[in-house]
Amino acid sequence: MNRKQLIDNIFSKKSVLCVGLDTDIAKIPAHLINDEDPVFAFNKAIIDATRDQAVAYKINTAFYEAQGIKGWISMEKTLKYIPGNIFTIADAKRGDIGNSSEQYARTFFHTYPFDSVTVAPYMGIDSVKPFLNFDGKWAIVLGITSNAGSADFQLRESEGELIYEKVLKTVASWGTIDNTMFVIGATRKEQLRHVRALLPLHFFLVPGVGAQGGDVATVCANTMNNDAGILINVSRGIIFADSSTSFAERANEEAIKYQKEMSLYF
């Protein structure tokens, strides 16, 4: 999916909602467990319930890889079920070099044709560049995260600037606004504003809203640009809003709530 297609869908829906399919089989409603493929059955219901509000779905591959071959099959079925006009993200956080990086890019852009994949940049250009060689595909590079451990490296100073600032500016020079996004944590208002000033045109994938303490208003007010420029990810707050047979209805209610709040910024 190219940048124009993504932006058009965002403005059509007046939404920047990315639904995170972090589908933990231990949390799937009990009535689905005996299904032939409970993970896919759950995901299918969530997609049906949120497709009118979502402009992106993020599949956290860890929850699928942990299930072995069955998990990979569930992931592929889920990817195929997502409507073609909705942006897809493989949240795989790959970050190797050379031939390995090229094969990871092939995995998530060819074998499993996602629109984008999350990438860790700390091994340098070799770990990112292979993901930038596919037309209509995106590398979503870890920029600044909101977990406690982010202070261990990202917030340390190097040559007069913080390491995450150096990462953002350097990686931005490797790609373009048409193939490079950044993961930017949602919980610090001043940081959000600062990062948008550093990168005025790039898209950001913003986790941390909902269960992790971030909120839509803070993110939108401090990071949206003329093209919207953000995808706000919500995972647990939507997909696990209810564990009963009404889980899909509750997911729909939560997605509508988020979309309505987002629509105020269009």
Image (cartoon, rainbow, N blue to C red):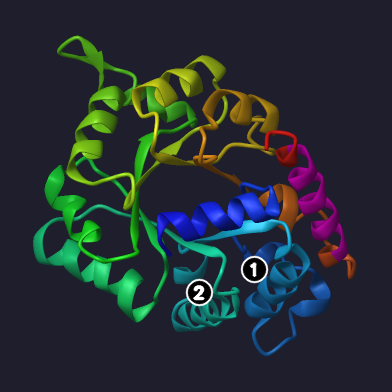
Position above or below: 21 against 237:
below
The answer to which quarter of the image holds residue 84 is bottom right
Amino acid marked by disc 1: Ile
Q: Residues within 10 Å of mark 2 (few under 14, many from 20)?
A: some
Position above or below: 39 against 150:
below
253 magenta-colored: yes
Q: Which residue is mark 1?
A: 25
Front-lying residue, 242 or 234: 234
Position above or below: 233 against 168:
below
**Residue 21 is at least partly visible in this image:** no
Residue at image location 62% in from the left, 64% down from the top = 23
Residue at image location 19% in from the left, 61% down from the top = 101
Chief secondary structure of the magenta portion: helix
SS class of the residue under badge 1? helix
Expressed as whole percent of the image width and height from the top left, the position of residue 88 reads 50, 64
Spatial CA span between label 1 and label 2: 9 Å
> Of marks 1 and 2, which one's residue comes earlier in the chain?
1
Amino acid marked by disc 2: Gln
Expressed as whole percent of the image width and height from the top left, the position of residue 118 reads 37, 53
Q: Which residues are magenta?
A: 249-261
For residue 136, side relative to residue 81 (left or right)? left
Expressed as whole percent of the image width and height from the top left, the position of residue 120 reads 29, 46
Residue at image location 29% in from the left, 31% down from the top = 168
Q: Residues within 10 Å of mark 1 (few under 14, many from 20)?
A: some
For residue 62, side relative to residue 99 (left or right)? right
42 magenta-colored: no
Residue at image location 44% in from the left, 33% down from the top = 145
Q: Which mark is residue 43?
A: none
Q: Which residue is mark 2?
A: 67
Kindly give the residue lying farthest to the left in the view shown: 98
Residue contact between numbered discs 1 and 2, judged by CB atoms under 8 Å: yes
